[in-house]
Amino acid sequence: MTRMHKPFRARAALLTTVVLWSCGAASAAEDPAPAVDPQVLARIRDAAMSQDWAYRELGELTDRIGPRLSGSPQLTAAIAQLATAMRGTGADVSTPAVKVPHWVRGEERGELVDYPGRPAGLTQRLHLTALGGSGATPAAGLTAPVVVVHDFQELEARAAQVRGRIVLFEARFDQRLADNGHAGDAYGQAGQYRFDGPARAAALGAAAALVRSVGGAEYRLPHTGTTLWHDGQKPIPAAALSAEDADLVTRLAAGGALSMRLTLTPRTLPDADSANVIADWRGRELPDEVVIVSGHLDSWDLATGATDDGVGVIAAAAVIETLHRLDLHPRRTVRFVGWTNEENGGRGGKAYFASVEHALATQTAAIESDEGAGRSLGLIAAVSADSEALLAPVTEALRPIGATLVSRTQGEVGADIEPLQAAGVPGFAPLVDSRHYFDYHHTAADTLDKVDPVAMNTQVATMAVLAYYLAELPQPLPPQPATPRRR
Amino acid sequence: MTRMHKPFRARAALLTTVVLWSCGAASAAEDPAPAVDPQVLARIRDAAMSQDWAYRELGELTDRIGPRLSGSPQLTAAIAQLATAMRGTGADVSTPAVKVPHWVRGEERGELVDYPGRPAGLTQRLHLTALGGSGATPAAGLTAPVVVVHDFQELEARAAQVRGRIVLFEARFDQRLADNGHAGDAYGQAGQYRFDGPARAAALGAAAALVRSVGGAEYRLPHTGTTLWHDGQKPIPAAALSAEDADLVTRLAAGGALSMRLTLTPRTLPDADSANVIADWRGRELPDEVVIVSGHLDSWDLATGATDDGVGVIAAAAVIETLHRLDLHPRRTVRFVGWTNEENGGRGGKAYFASVEHALATQTAAIESDEGAGRSLGLIAAVSADSEALLAPVTEALRPIGATLVSRTQGEVGADIEPLQAAGVPGFAPLVDSRHYFDYHHTAADTLDKVDPVAMNTQVATMAVLAYYLAELPQPLPPQPATPRRR
């Protein structure tokens, strides 16, 4: 995932707004004619938990294809592979074309060539990786003094020192927040410097910008991710330093001037052909009304993207496979979408929205999983309190797997479904244990071993029960107040 | 550290042979005339725990100099810097010359170019790093099929399939052992394939050899380290794969043939000039008799070697600084040695042994710290049971910092002091919490942030109290039965 606005979400108050549904569920159980048969929901949960289709498909995606950055042949292969897999479920599969940005990583090297107390002739090598959308240095690199700032105020206060220099944004990911269930907030706090720091440094004339890696790990791994430029702005070279190297630069800078040689040679190519993968599991009564269940198929290029978002997109696909295996067709269509280009453009979500904008009433709900491979604790629901009350049968069905919490929010819950949410479509996500998601997020270590198959299945079960329930309800949830569009 | 023989050490029975010294200590306290004043030992402990010289010097070593592989200008600078620091303590400092191997890393790339189920045109990039002493591929790389074996028996059983191929030794580091206090044994079990696997594969005609990284971490970090060649054998290209990439190769190989392109271009240059750093803190009565306190100053080249063995060598140096600060001169000389070339040759230890072999009776004991930055739990002592009983005042003095355990062994406790031990000199090491040492060991992540200053000080205190005590005893410990020389 690549969102920047989590600090603004209602999820900030996750632990305090969690609602346990036992009372509501008891009432629902006493209801003589529940709108959706609880026995069916239980069967869906059990089928989702007992399948191994999801983990096997994730293995195919990551082991045989690998990283899937927009514009890469790997993403094209992944689209074909997933479309084939979905045809195997009997769903109606299509792959509507989407043009995507095509940024490719080049050489990347950093070296401290001067610093206080440096023995003559020595340099210190740094571990870094270009941010998506970074500009390039000359092929031989650029050498410039380094200015370390800790926040935007300090950047502004030292604006006169920035021109022609390399700015390092030294803002730490707060692992304590992540450990307490607020990983998204920790990501938002530190991530703002990755998203906006390079553009703001460029506006002040900086030669290049570095950010401390946004994530909780300490294994000298740089964390890539998108950086955003102002309209008309020429991108400057921008990279993430590993936490250890950010520490080193900061310690040395405290003792005097230091100078860095930086080489980054990424290129931005013409937009490339890509596609969303759509698989419709046809509704038995109202096939034109859809409940979306989704994740994104693209990933960053440093690893196989097993947790961002292989696990989410395949767990969502497994919802269709589960309904297929049970031969269950709810009232409305359950539409799987494997989004393209979530990481560096969001073009998949935007293109889909454009295709349905004329008939938004058909889009009754949208679910996206993009918070990593942790087990599901329940639901995030961008709905009104009245709608939330209707979800009790879902959490009751999920009680045996411990996914009983509902975190209600007014904000966006998935980058790809954000355009839909902004137009009033109720948005949902599994509420995932993300305490260690950002250890690996956007690094070379986002690989299959980070996925526990049982935890993955709790996401399948959560989305399958929720999607079926929403698609089976006699009336869809009412539209939500439109959330403010992000950017 | 780089030793390979830990599984053969008596330390395998660490937890069962640990001796708590409270009874012995009580007797010692009742002794009307202890051989060494317990008050002095307590003062040394407290002075060691309250200083920050050690952590500051470690910062100088790692931040300003960085990696210190034998033959590098960084190691030369480190020798000069440490000699200067030791002169500041008033010790007699010398830097006797030692010729060391000079191996330099080159390009290193690995890529799976064919594997079962590969979509046309795709390859998978692998994370790997050359092992010290590796031979080189052609500059453009070599491409060959991969044979995965799990142990030497399987290698021999499949000997006919090895010629011209790339052999991967897939042997896992057993983190459960490490978590239970047997990190050295876990290292020995998996490490044997790094030490001996490439040579054995080369003997069967392999084109190259890979080993699964020896260590407990899962952050796609390859762990370098020495590999050993048979006499007269031409080194083949040899590298460590990250755990994740070893997993990937092993999973794909289970489905059929796969092929790898491997590029490694290290070079072995003529032996280089180097030196041990020796600082003698002169004994007041028997200055020609010495107690050695030591660590190694060289490191691998991927990181700044903060835990292997910056922390050990500087903690040992801080013993001298502590005695200097307290103005305490025990009966014998306390000799600090900062060894050169522990990692890929052991030339420092061998050269020192050659220089004292004619007068071994002057070498009354040798201490080395090379087990990482964990806190000290007590002592490892390669001594007889009778000598062990004499150590009670040491552990009693360390009781307030919890370093009360004694693990007695018949084996080597430090690679650089092994020649001395093999000749009968009693050998000692701090007994260090090494549960997480191998997460970072020989990787790019062995950096200063992995060192806790208080934990480091427990090593200073342990070595300072032990060294003073041994140097102050009226009679030195008797020589030990010579341990069998390793290699």
Image (spheres, coloured by chain):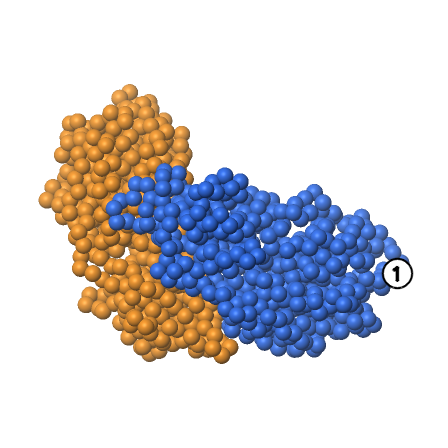
Chain colours: A orange, B blue
User: How far across and how far down the image is residue A37, in percent?
Assistant: 28, 24
Residue found 29% across the figure and 72% down from its top: A138
* Visible residue check, residue A390: no
Side of A433 relative to B358 (left or right): left
User: How far across and how far down the image is residue A297, in percent?
Assistant: 27, 46
User: How far across and how far down the image is residue B322, in percent?
Assistant: 69, 69
Question: Which of the chains bears the disc numbered 1?
Answer: B
Residue found 25% across the figure and 46% down from its top: B120
* Visible residue check, residue B284: yes
Side of A130 relative to B350 (left or right): left
Instruction: Please give the count of numbered marks on the rendered protein.
Output: 1
Q: What kind of element bears circle 1?
A: loop
Of A386 and A62, which appears nearest the observer? A62
Badge 1: few (under 14), some or many (20 or more) residues near its Cα, within 10 Å?
few
Of B209 and B77, which appears nearest the observer? B209
User: How far across and how far down the image is residue B418, in percent?
Assistant: 68, 58
Quarter occupied by residue B400: bottom right
Of B442 and B345, which appears nearest the observer? B345
Pointer 1 residue: B33
Residue found 37% across the figure and 55% down from its top: B142
The amino acid pointed to by label 1 is Ala
Side of B189 relative to B107 (left or right): right
Screen quadrant of the N terminus of chain B: bottom right
Screen quadrant of the C terminus of chain B: bottom right
